[in-house]
């Protein structure tokens, strides 16, 4: 109560820090507890494939072939059960639209799976018997959400739906069960479950190298996973020697899958390294706040000499004085925790919005969080109160009565170390933020080797792709449409490996796997890709004319491969007609791989992406006309589109989210550090008021006084800068290694961080220094 302003700043700084730590903790806890609701999760693994075809860069895939799971189970008794989870469209069914009583619904997440799904993933059955879970080929299991969309409040069990799979083909499916919607912390989010049909088509049901979707294995307890991976690899090598088996723990799928391709059904996945960053930064903020608390408490304690001396004279024991200081600290920390609870409740919705999560405000009332608050209260009280309590209680009465000060300049060393430490952490945050923002700007603005301004992307199922000529004919009549093309792979995705054959310069026939794109004949012109040798596609090209990228051209080995024979496996003889300059068709997290581009127009599944370029004039009306054309010409009322630049932004959503979080955390770290510096500077200015007054009387100028008062703090910030630079440099270079295309850390980033810290400290201290320097010296000299 005697130091209201300092106490307020101390409590506010610690409260903000605890609130930040609570929010970070809730987020990290949520991410690390994905799939924790599943019984026996410790023995469930996702079966990943390490693919290493000749000529192709090895890749880790979450998608597997149809026969793989049963083959491995039959040959390995360690496998108790398996569940495959393959997207029902486009490879198994061309499209899926459900109809009931004339009402049509298109579900986005329908899968073909096994009857073991319910037991494997702990699905809660709402309607139907567990024994009859998806018991027939023509049965379907719906989630509660999809059942409500189709049937409203009616009971869904045993009702029959019409499942349209083409314009002219449909089948009847009966609802065998309704399950509860999967928890938000499940990496698998599906709406409907179907059985596998007897025949998938094109012999793919017997293809061990096909990549349909994820397979999950439940293993017997106590298995040596590394040794079992080797055993599984040896098993699959009898069918395909280019595939090795990898087992990924179920609880790691959500946070450790950023380097895995074909990662279907991984809801809101995040790069686990960012969670470590959040944990470290949260603890750093908490540490800064504790440093502030200790620093200011110690500074104030140094001038409590008269109070402590009188208490000792009238009989107070050392343990009583220690208890008093600890009690004061306890009340301050308790006030901070109460404030942090309020701040957490206020800002949790904003964090949910930033991170695209659904953390519930009610989670703040959970007992485990209450327990954490109690631990924070006790630990912080001990950390922040024990040293000042020991310091104050150890004072000598005779010395205190002479000087009224408990301890002298030797204790300033500790204060200086603490201030330096907290600003070193703040400088690390500032530098890290600069590098984060620079890298994010780089990947969002890097020239990918093609133009995508004003381009919208329309995903096509096989049924719609078969109508592509009609759709394009209609689009050509829309005034605002300037051009259109089609492709196979999704730009920004992981590509699709296909086998190719060619004759090497030494005459040897080579068979390798490379990424394959099937584009319309205007594909390269549409995106403004640069043909550096040969030509692009033309109307009079042979059917199997191909364009290759620079990377593949170098791998083939000819000085000029144009005109050389190249064959897509299982297709007639082809020829290279041109070389396109390398472009980033995948994420910037990966390097450009060899690519072959064809223009084969008679395979609908290879025309799964429609790209439409629109003019900037009357864009709103153009989009409405385009949407109308797409729906009418395709016959699909649920067809959708997105701008390609927005699609690319989504690729780096987790990086952007991390950048925003780091920016917020850095801002909080700087704010808390400045609060501590401000309060400490204020306190010191008060204690040096008489000294400053005497200096003014003796002729010192305001400028000289301000410089003298600020110099000490600026020196500490400069020392903090030199401590922070190597730490920040190491951390950021480590982070940047996760990008195939990245910036380099440069001297100006560190200099800018240091300058920013010095300016912030200068502004913080100067305000108090100016107030002290311009104060009337007579007022101070009249007081004791």
Image (spheres, rainbow, N blue to C red):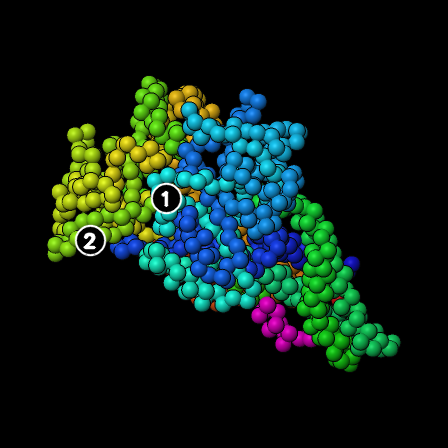
Q: Nearer the viewer, residue 318 or 28?
A: 28
Is disc 1 surrounded by few (<14), some (14 to 19) or many (20+) residues within 10 Å?
A: some
Q: Give the percent coordinates (x, y) of residue 465.
A: 36, 30
Q: Quadrant of the C terminus?
A: bottom right
Residue 376 picture quarter: bottom right
Tell whether 494 sits left or right of 394.
left
Instruction: Report whether residue 436 is seen.
Output: no
Mark closer to the observer (2, 1): 1
Residue 568 picture quarter: top left
Give the mark, 2 or 1, whose residue is nearer the N terminus: 1
Q: Where is mark 1, residue-wise?
A: 204
Q: Quadrant of the N terminus?
A: bottom right
Q: Where is mark 2, residue-wise?
A: 510
Tell whether 73 sits left or right of 480.
right
Determine the residue positioned at 68% across, 68% down. 383
Q: Give the percent coordinates (x, y) of residue 332.
A: 74, 60
Q: Give the percent coordinates (x, y) of residue 79.
A: 50, 59
Rendered view: 747 above or below 212: below
Q: Give the percent coordinates (x, y) of residue 765.
A: 58, 58
């Amino acid at each position: 109560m005697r130091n209201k302003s300092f106490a307020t700043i101390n409590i506010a700084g610690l409260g903000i820090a605890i609130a930040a730590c609570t929010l970070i903790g809730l987020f990290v806890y949520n991410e690390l507890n994905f799939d924790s609701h599943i019984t026996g999760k410790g023995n469930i693994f996702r079966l990943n494939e390490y693919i290493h075809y000749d000529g192709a860069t090895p890749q880790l895939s979450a998608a597997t072939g149809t026969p793989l799971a049963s083959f491995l189970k039959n040959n390995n008794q360690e496998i108790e059960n398996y569940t495959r989870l393959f997207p029902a469209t486009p490879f198994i069914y061309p499209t899926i639209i459900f109809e009931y009583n004339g009402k049509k619904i298109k579900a986005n997440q329908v899968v073909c799976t096994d009857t073991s799904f319910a037991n494997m993933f702990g699905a809660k059955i709402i309607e139907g018997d567990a024994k009859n879970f998806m018991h027939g080929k023509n049965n379907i299991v719906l989630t509660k959400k999809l059942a409500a969309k189709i049937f409203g409040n009616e009971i869904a069990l045993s009702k029959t739906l019409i499942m349209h799979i083409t314009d002219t083909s449909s089948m009847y499916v009966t609802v065998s069960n309704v399950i509860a919607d999967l928890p938000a912390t499940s990496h698998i989010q599906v709406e409907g479950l179907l059985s596998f049909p007897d025949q998938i088509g094109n012999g793919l049901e017997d293809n061990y190298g096909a990549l349909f979707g994820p397979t999950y294995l439940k293993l017997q307890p106590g298995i040596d996973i590394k040794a079992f991976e080797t055993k599984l690899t040896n098993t699959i090598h009898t069918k395909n020697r280019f595939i090795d088996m990898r087992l990924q723990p179920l609880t790691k799928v959500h946070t450790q899958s950023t380097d895995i391709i074909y990662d279907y059904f991984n809801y809101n996945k995040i790069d686990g390294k960012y969670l470590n960053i959040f944990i470290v930064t949260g603890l750093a903020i908490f540490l800064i706040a504790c440093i502030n608390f200790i620093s200011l408490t110690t500074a104030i304690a140094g001038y409590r000499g008269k109070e402590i001396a009188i208490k000792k004279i009238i009989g107070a024991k050392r343990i009583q004085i220690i208890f008093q200081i600890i009690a004061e600290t306890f009340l301050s920390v308790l006030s901070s925790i109460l404030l942090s609870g309020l701040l957490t409740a206020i800002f949790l919705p904003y964090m949910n919005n930033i991170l695209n999560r659904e953390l519930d405000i009610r989670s703040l009332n959970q007992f485990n969080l209450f327990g954490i608050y109690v631990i924070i209260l006790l630990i912080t009280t001990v950390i922040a109160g024990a040293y000042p309590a020991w310091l104050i209680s150890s004072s000598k009465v005779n010395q205190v009565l002479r000087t009224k000060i408990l301890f002298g300049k030797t204790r300033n060393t500790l204060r200086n170390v603490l201030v330096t430490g907290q600003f070193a952490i703040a400088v690390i945050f500032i530098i890290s933020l600069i590098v984060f923002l620079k890298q994010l700007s780089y990947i969002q603005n890097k020239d990918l080797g093609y133009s995508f301004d004003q381009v919208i992307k329309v995903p096509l199922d096989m049924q719609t792709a078969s109508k592509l000529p009609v759709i394009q004919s209609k689009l050509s009549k829309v005034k605002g449409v300037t051009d259109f093309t089609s492709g196979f792979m999704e730009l920004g995705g992981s590509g699709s490996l296909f086998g190719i054959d060619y004759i090497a310069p030494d005459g040897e026939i080579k068979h390798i796997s490379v990424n394959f794109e099937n584009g319309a004949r205007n594909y390269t012109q549409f995106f403004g890709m640069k043909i550096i040798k040969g030509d692009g596609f033309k109307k009079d090209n042979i059917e199997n004319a191909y364009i290759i990228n620079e990377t593949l051209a170098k791998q083939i080995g000819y000085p000029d491969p144009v005109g050389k024979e190249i064959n897509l496996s299982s297709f007639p003889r082809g020829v290279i007609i041109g070389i396109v300059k390398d472009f980033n068709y995948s994420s910037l997290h990966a390097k450009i791989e060899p690519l072959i581009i064809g223009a084969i127009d008679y395979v609908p599944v290879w025309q799964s992406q429609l790209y439409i370029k629109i003019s900037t004039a009357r864009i709103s009306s153009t989009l409405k006309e385009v949407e109308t054309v797409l729906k009418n010409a395709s016959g699909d009322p649920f067809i959708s589109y997105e701008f390609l630049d927005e699609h690319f932004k989504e690729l780096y959503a987790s990086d952007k989210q991390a950048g925003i979080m780091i920016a917020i955390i850095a801002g909080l770290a700087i704010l808390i550090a400045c609060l501590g510096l401000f309060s400490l500077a204020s306190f010191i200015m008060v204690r040096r008021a008489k000294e400053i007054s005497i200096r003014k009387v003796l002729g010192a100028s305001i400028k000289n006084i301000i410089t003298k008062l600020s110099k000490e703090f600026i020196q500490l910030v400069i020392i903090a800068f030199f401590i922070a630079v190597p730490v920040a440099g190491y951390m950021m270079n480590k982070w940047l290694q996760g990008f195939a295309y990245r910036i380099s850390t440069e001297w100006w980033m560190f200099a800018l961080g240091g300058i920013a810290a010095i300016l912030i400290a200068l502004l913080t201290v100067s305000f108090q220094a100016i107030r002290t320097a311009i104060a009337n010296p007579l007022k101070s000299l009249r007081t004791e």
